[in-house]
Image (cartoon, rainbow, N blue to C red):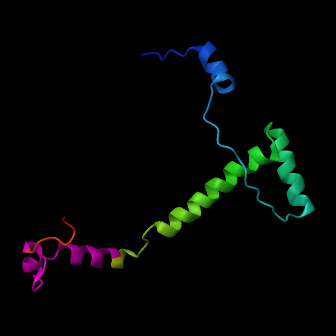
């Protein structure tokens, strides 16, 4: 089966489609070497974007990666196996838990 693409819509969509815009009011200053600045400006120009439009998506993506890595649980295979063994054990009874669950809630009116 051949996929049909409406070239008229496809070709004009990036330029005519209205996206929700967020006001950009914050600034971020960076210290760079002259070579770093020149490379960034050259790459932005080659890609047809401003330095801001070129740089921000890359910075945001890297920031997201760092934040995700911080939030992920990482452990060795041995630690993972030990963790799973504990999860697979039957629950141990806790004295007073059943009584606590039968008491009236302190959060109800």
For this orientation, the residue located farthest to the front is 109
Which image quadrant for residue 78?
bottom left
Q: Is residue 24 left or right of residue 84?
A: right
Quadrant that contains the C terminus: bottom left
Is residue 104 one of those drawn in magenta? no
State the residue at coordinates (92%, 61%). Answer: 34
Q: Nearer the viewer, residue 50 or 24?
A: 24
State the residue at coordinates (66%, 27%). Answer: 14
Vertical comparison of 42 with 90: above or below: above
Q: Nearer the viewer, residue 17 or 85?
A: 17
For this orientation, the residue located farthest to the bottom is 95
Give the image location of residue 65, x and y in percent.
57, 60
Vertical comparison of 93 with 26: above or below: below
Which image quadrant for residue 36?
bottom right
- Start and end of the magenta stretch? 80-102
State the residue at coordinates (90%, 53%). Answer: 38
Is residue 98 one of those drawn in magenta? yes
How many numbered marks, from 0 up? 0
Majority secondary structure in the magenta region: helix
Q: Nearer the viewer, residue 28 or 84?
A: 28
Give the image location of residue 20, x and y in percent.
60, 35
Which image quadrant for residue 85?
bottom left
State the residue at coordinates (12%, 84%). Answer: 94
Give the image location of residue 62, x and y in percent.
63, 58
Quadrant that contains the N terminus: top left
Vertical comparison of 80 with 37: above or below: below
């Amino acid at each position: 089966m051949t996929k049909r693409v409406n070239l008229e819509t496809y070709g004009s969509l990036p330029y005519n489609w209205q996206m929700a815009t967020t006001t950009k009011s914050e600034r971020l200053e960076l210290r760079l070497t002259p070579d770093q600045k020149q490379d960034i400006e050259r790459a932005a120009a080659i890609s047809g974007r401003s330095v801001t439009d070129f740089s921000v998506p890359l910075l945001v993506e890297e920031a997201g990666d760092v934040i995700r890595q911080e939030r992920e649980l990482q452990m060795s295979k041995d630690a993972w196996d030990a963790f799973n063994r504990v999860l697979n054990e039957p629950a141990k009874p806790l004295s007073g838990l059943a009584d606590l669950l039968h008491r009236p809630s302190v959060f109800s009116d």
